[in-house]
Image (tube, rainbow, N blue to C red):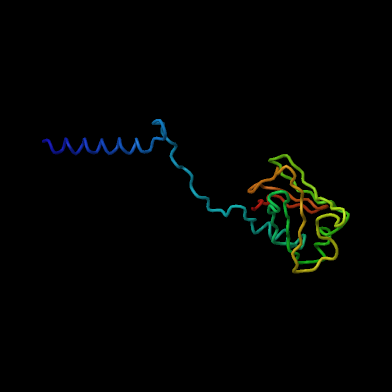
Amino acid sequence: MRTPFRVSLLAVGVGALAAAQAAGPAGMPQKANLHHPSRYTAGAMPASARNYYASTWGVDQLATQLAESGQLVRFSYRILDSSLAKPLLDKVSSPSLLDEHAHAVLSVPTMEKVGPLRQSGAAEAGKTYWVLFSNRGRVVHDGDRVSVVIGSFRVDGLVVQK
C-alpha cells in the first residue's frame, strides 16, 4: 500500500516544481505564451494591390526603408509602364510620406546645390526610382506602416524596413 502513496506524492512534487519554475521573480506567475504564428507574411503587399498599382500606375516593387541612421526614409519603386508612371516623376508634384500612428507628415528635403532629393524627368521602363523624405527627430521607425502621396498617386500600408 505504501508504493501508490509514494507515487502520488512524487507526482504532486513534480507538479509543484513545474509551477515554481513557471513562476517569475518573487514567485509571481508568468503569462502563458498564447501567441500563434500568423499564416500571413508580415508586411507583404497583397497580390490584388500589386496588380492595381501595376495596371493603374505602371509601377511595382514599392518599398520604404530607413536610410542614413534613420534621418531619411527612402521610398523606391520600379517602373513597368513609363506612360502610366509619368505623374510620379512630375517636378511640380510635392511628395509626402504620412505616418498616421506618429501623426507625422514628412517632406522631401531640398539641398542648395542639388535641389530636391528625388528623381524626376523622363520615365524609363525597368528602372528603379527613389524619393528621400526627411525624418528629422526620427518620428518614423522601423516597422511603422506609412502612406506615400505624390500628386494623385497614393499608396497605403507600406512597412518601413531597416
Of 70 and 157, nearer the camera is 70
Quarter-wise, where is residue 102 in the image? top right
The structure residue drawn at horizontal position 77% and vertical position 48%, both measured from the top left corner, is 134
Front-most of 157 and 161? Answer: 161
Instruction: Using the image, determine if residue 4 lies above or below residue 162.
Output: above
- Residue 42 lies, in percent from the top left, at 59, 52
- Number of numbered callouts drawn: 0
Quarter assignment of residue 31 = top left
Q: Position of residue 67 (x, y in %)?
A: 70, 53
Residue 94 screen position, x and y as percent: 84, 51
When the figure is inspected, residue 131 is found, relative to residue 82, above or below; the finding is above
Depth check, front residue: 79 or 75? 75
Q: Is residue 145 left or right of residue 127?
A: left
Quadrant of the frame with the N terminus: top left
Residue that protrudes farthest toward the left in the picture:
1
Q: Residue 116: x percent and y percent? A: 84, 54
Tell me what residue is drawn at x 81 percent, y 60 percent: 119
Left or right? Give the position of 24 relative to 157: left
Residue furthest to the front in view is 113
User: In the visual, does 140 lie left or right of 115?
Assistant: left
Q: Nearer the viewer, residue 56 or 59?
A: 59
